[in-house]
């Protein structure tokens, strides 16, 4: 069965309490929201439901408070930002399903919006015990009274088998929110009949984080361009001396197997030909561009660290990206947080803006890199809001939060 969307819910929503699971997990600094991207993205579904006459209860997590109340993880600053962005009196409960949330939920009028506290203040949210999660889900559903509904708009959380994402959907009529619908639509275009040439760019720190994605996309993409920290495990597998660069020895056999599959006809795997090596992992470290067969000849010698792809590699990758009809990028090409090692990531980010087909950026740090380097979201076909969830989808895994909506 396919999931129902918010479009199916709106006609019957006047006077009903709708629980909206949103992804409001934003960065905070001394009680202020420093990047409100997720709040802005979540507001359309919330305000549309309220404007249509629903009583809206917003449910979200923030950080990892480990199942107890933690003032530093309160949704207070998020509710405050929601007030500023909507000019509405957003109500904040003091707890998740306790007396404050119950009281506020009962008092709600049509069109009003209540935010209950960080759902991870309740240890049952993330419990491995089905009965514990279900008990919390019952309490959440009870906030909606007799004729409630549930909307999951938190794509960033759909890979979690949590009470507010998974168990609740069995208790209330459940619907896909617009953010979830958009993400699935785009990610499907990377999985099913992608327009070709289809190029996947993978970087980031650890190859072990990305093995399952490589595994699944090897049979779907035409080309895999490898950069970032994981490139050195690929280089090592090809026999290069990678000095003291990030290396996952235990993954060498798996990487060798991928290279073999590539040689046998799966997607072409391309690895760097030059790299930026530094004498230390520091923003002001001495550095040089070297060919990958001469990494120990740079500053630092055998203690050298490869911290970025080199300019020749970046140029070659950019040309490949620009000539593609579908591009998925996950993982920075280097330590972009340090200016001297940001050039490779910048070149790739720039190249993706020139793609004439579909360009998708996935992954928390990759999305942050694009923004930190000054590129605009709308220069890309899509920037995925759910790092872990989008990767798990591209690994071909079933996402509990998506599955629960299908069966609801
Ligand atoms: P994403 O969140 O987009 O999936 P990752 O979390 O896998 O990306 O990786 C991001 C991190 O990888 C960044 O903090 C970046 O500094 C780091 N990184 C990239 N290249 C290297 C490298 N050569 N050595 C060490 N760390 C690297
Ligand atoms: Mg990351």
Image (spheres, rainbow, N blue to C red):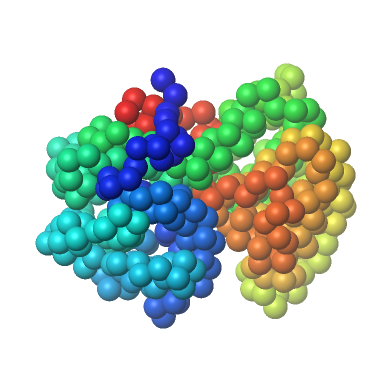
Q: Toward which corner of the image does residue 378 lie, by quadrant?
A: bottom right
Identify the residue shown where x is 61% and y is 28%.
191
Give left or right: position of 149 versus 81. left
Between 185 and 225, which is closer to the camera in this rendering? Answer: 185
Q: Is residue 133 visible?
A: no
Between 6 and 199, which is closer to the camera in this rendering? Answer: 6
Q: Position of residue 58 (x, y in %)?
A: 33, 55
Position of the N terminus, as image quadrant, is top left
Q: Is residue 356 above or below residue 385?
A: above
Give left or right: position of 175 versus 380. left
Q: Is residue 78 visible?
A: yes
Identify the residue shown where x is 21% and y is 44%.
141
Q: Position of residue 38 (x, y in %)?
A: 50, 58
Q: Toward which corner of the image does residue 120 lie, by quadrant?
A: bottom left
Identity of the residue furthest to the bottom in this view = 30
Q: Is residue 117 above or below residue 315?
A: below
Q: Toward which corner of the image does residue 368 lie, by quadrant?
A: bottom right
Position of the C terminus, as image quadrant, is top left
Identify the residue shown where x is 21% and y is 57%.
105
| Labels in figure, total | 0
Q: Position of residue 214 (x, y in %)?
A: 61, 34
Q: Quadrant of ligand 1?
A: bottom right
Identify the residue shown where x is 71% and y is 50%.
380
Q: Position of residue 404 (x, y in %)?
A: 34, 31
Between 195 and 16, which is closer to the camera in this rendering? Answer: 16
Give left or right: position of 303 versus 119. right
């Amino acid at each position: 069965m396919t999931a129902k969307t918010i479009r199916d819910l709106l006609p019957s929503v006047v006077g009903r309490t709708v629980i909206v699971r949103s992804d409001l997990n934003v960065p905070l600094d001394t009680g202020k929201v420093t990047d409100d991207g997720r709040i802005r993205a979540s507001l359309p579904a919330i305000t549309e439901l309220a404007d249509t006459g629903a009583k809206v209860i917003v449910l979200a997590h923030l950080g990892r408070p480990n199942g107890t109340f933690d003032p530093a993880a309160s949704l207070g600053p998020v509710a405050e930002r929601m007030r500023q962005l909507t000019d509405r009196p957003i109500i904040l409960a003091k707890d998740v399903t306790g007396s404050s949330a119950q009281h506020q939920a009962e008092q709600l009028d049509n069109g009003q919006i209540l935010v209950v506290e960080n759902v991870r203040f309740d240890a049952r949210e993330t419990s491995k015990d089905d009965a514990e999660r279900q008990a919390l889900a019952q309490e959440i559903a009870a906030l909606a009274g007799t004729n409630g509904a549930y909307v999951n708009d938190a794509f960033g959380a759909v890979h979690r088998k949590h009470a507010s994402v998974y168990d609740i959907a069995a208790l209330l009529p459940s619907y896909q929110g617009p953010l979830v619908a958009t993400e699935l639509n785009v990610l499907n275009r990377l999985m099913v009949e992608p327009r070709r040439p289809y190029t996947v760019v993978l970087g980031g720190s650890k190859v072990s984080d990305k093995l399952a994605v490589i595994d699944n996309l090897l049979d779907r993409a035409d080309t895999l361009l490898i950069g970032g920290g994981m490139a050195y495990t690929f280089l090592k597998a090809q026999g290069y001396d990678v000095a003291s660069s990030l290396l996952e020895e235990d993954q060498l056999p798996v990487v060798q197997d991928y290279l073999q599959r590539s040689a046998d006809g799966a997607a072409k795997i391309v690895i760097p030909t030059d790299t930026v090596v530094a004498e230390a992992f520091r923003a002001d470290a001495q550095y040089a561009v070297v060919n990958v067969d001469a990494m120990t000849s740079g500053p630092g010698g055998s203690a050298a660290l490869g911290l970025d792809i080199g300019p020749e590699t970046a140029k070659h990758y950019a040309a490949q990206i620009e000539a593609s009809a579908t591009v998925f990028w996950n993982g920075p090409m280097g330590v972009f947080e340090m200016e001297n090692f940001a050039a490779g990531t910048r070149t790739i980010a720039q190249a993706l803006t020139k793609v004439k087909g579909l360009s998708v950026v996935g992954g928390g740090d990759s999305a942050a890199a694009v923004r930190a380097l000054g590129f605009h979201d709308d220069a890309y076909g899509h920037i995925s809001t759910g790092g872990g969830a989008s990767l798990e989808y591209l690994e071909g895994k079933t996402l509990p939060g998506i599955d629960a909506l299908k069966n609801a």
